[in-house]
Image (spheres, rainbow, N blue to C red):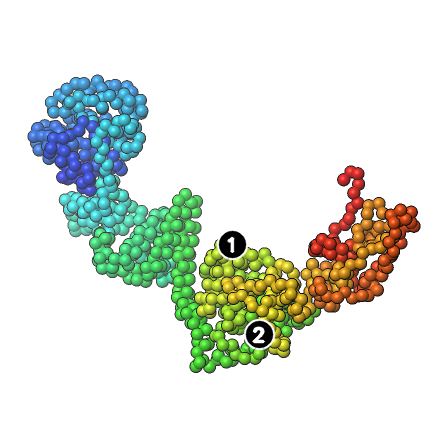
Amino acid sequence: MTTALYRRYRPETFGEMIGQSQVTDPLMTALRGDRVGHAYLFSGPRGCGKTTSARILARCLNCAAGPTDTPCGTCDSCVELSRAGGGSLDVVEIDAASHNGVDDARDLRERATFAPSRDRYKIFILDEAHMVTPQGFNALLKLVEEPPEHVKFIFATTEPEKVLGTIRSRTHHYPFRLVPPAAMLEYVAKLCGEEGVIVEQGVLPLVVRAGGGSPRDTLSLLDQLIAGSDAPAGSETVTVAYARAVSLLGYTHAALLDEIVDALAAGDAAAAFPAIDRVVQTGQDPRRFVDDLLERLRDLIVIAAVGAGASAVLRGIAEDDLESMRAQAAAFGAARLSRTADVVSAALDDMSGATSPRLHLELMVARVLAGTTDAVAQAPAQPAAVARSAAPERVAAPAAAPAPVAESAPAVTDSVPSDSVPTADAPEPSSPEPSSPEPSPASPASAAPAAVTAPTGPVTLASVLAAWPAVLTRLEGISRTSWLLATAVQPLAYVTESEVLTLGFTSQHDVAKFKGTTPGSGPSDHLRTAIEQELGVRVKYVPAPMPSGGAPRQPAASAPPATADAAPASEPASAGPSRPQARGASASAVTEWAVAPIPTAQEVVSAPPAPAAPLPVDDEPEEVEAAASAPVPPADGIVDRDEPPLPGDDEAPSFDDEPPYDPSYEPPASRQGPTAPTPATPAARNEAPAPAAPAQQRASSAPPVVTERAPSLGGVQRYGEAVIRQVLGATFVREEPYEPPTRFS
């Protein structure tokens, strides 16, 4: 029977320790200067040399030639504390996991009072010190704080934070770390040479990786591989085969890993999924395979970044393997390697605790392949986008042959109604609706005469409509929320000179959301950026109601020229059909959102009548406006039906007798100003004023005679509204039924 490798090759001096120079160098310096403390705390991961260093420190302190940083190895103390030694009476190793109580601490205090039997110091090594209970630590506190001159304490633990703080503060704390892979790889290669064992290429990197930086775990795995290997035929030297190491350690074979990586790099799903099936059919853990794949992608990223110097970073890899990995890194590319590594890392996190790891593995491969397909599909689309953004400049060039045909297209449509112009986003309506005249947008285009001439600028409404899908595509890349709002918006008109774009909205609420609340970062700013990227112009907006047919509206070719004063301004879409207004002679300059000045009273009076349009809720029929302009006071004895009846009046008509008001009523004539003359028609007011009489006569006079007033010109008659308008200056909003007060209300 042989001794385990980690026991046969346990270091006996600080010089034989590997990867722990942060501990060995200061300890050796303290030993050389005779500045050794009375208590030490060694902490770190398992198998990294804490207990071994405690034994070496005990040898250095009790060596016959010491205290020294290099034990002689020949004295009785050094021989007893060596690898093959049976231990010393003056060096006591205590397993704190099973001796952690108050009674054990009391026993240790009693033993510490006795002087060492032979050596210089009595040294107590407490392994797994974090297992001692708080009561046990409190029992040791006084001894550790002020020990006898011949007593030294060495605590070893993997969890130093669990050691009582009062104990930890009275020790010299030395943290141990895991051994780096390069130092560990060199160490195990040296051991294999001393053992006379041949290992195939790639075995030792797998052993070092499986050991995780712990020398004890690494030597245990190597010992297991050597014990399970035999000598080939005709040779007496044991050879550790790569296939056996892969099978025993559970890693993915390099050939299978290369096959999967090549399939993913080429986007070959027909080769990737069968390879994944072989991974599962061989019984390998899918989580371990994903970890191996992520490790390979990390190596490829290093190779792509470092290039020829990758061998200095990736130690233990043969040169021919590095060449094949360079080819794989070139096939992937740096960007795809990073994205693929992100997908694999996310899949590894999702597979932790998953009940179906194979499903997660196959979905991960599908996502990697989908990303490869998207990258290949998007590669040739970039030159097309550049050519599309440069299209307006080519139209403006004098040598462009298709330019006159493209620019004359919008002028031909000026001779047809605006509702019949088709767009790229909306289907062409079957027939226009002449009964619903549409308000003109408040843009300079409506003020200029429609002439069949080519515009001076390269961007027209036709080019805007043609590029609108591309603009929305760019907008989706800028902001998804802004894109959702812009899909319900439609360009209606565009003025080349002032770069004003009229947009159609379905409601005023959409206009408010489109403007946004934060200047510079709203949906309107995002759309402006997308238009500027696509067409090369920075537009300004004018909101307008969406046409019934959903088509852009242009001024008719046969329409007479209109001045700037008569240019109608658009209103928010939520206010229903727009209301004709008159603009001032000196309109302000167009800003980000084009606006129109509020007309004064003189401008309203002097402005020519606007085209007939559907009345909003506030507009009144002509006869009601005429009555409101010059009301006739009622005479005594005659009840004016324009006044609301008093409660209890027997002659007052009930609410049910009043005709309902129809807001959609449209008079044939336009609204007149407040100074227009009132038409004197008998139907407008047929009651005659009565002569005045004293109050006594009115009290004893006959019951009043109610004269009904017939509506003129076929309108709707409403009682008392003209007087309310005249006296209070009120505006009609809606009709509500009148309920006479009672004694309960």
Element on which disc 1 rests: loop
- Residue drawn at x 84%, y 45% as measured from the top left: 648
Asked if residue 547 lies left or right of residue 483, the reply is: right
In the picture, the quarter occupied by the N terminus is top left
Q: Nearer the viewer, mark 1 or mark 2?
A: 2
As rendered, which of 580 and 312 lies closer to the eye?
Answer: 580
As rendered, which of 219 and 665 lies closer to the eye?
Answer: 665
- Residue drawn at x 28%, y 24% as measured from the top left: 137
Q: Position of residue 470 (x, y in %)?
A: 48, 67
Q: Is residue 3 visible?
A: no
Element on which disc 2 rests: loop
Which image quarter: residue 731?
bottom right
Q: Which residue is labeled 2 in the image?
A: 448
Query: Three-letter amino acid code at disc 2?
Result: Ala
Q: Residues within 10 Å of mark 2 (few under 14, many from 20)?
A: some
Q: Position of residue 238 (x, y in %)?
A: 19, 47
Q: Which residue is labeled 1 in the image?
A: 517
**Relative vertical location of residue 485 with respect to residue 428 in this rendering, above or below:** above
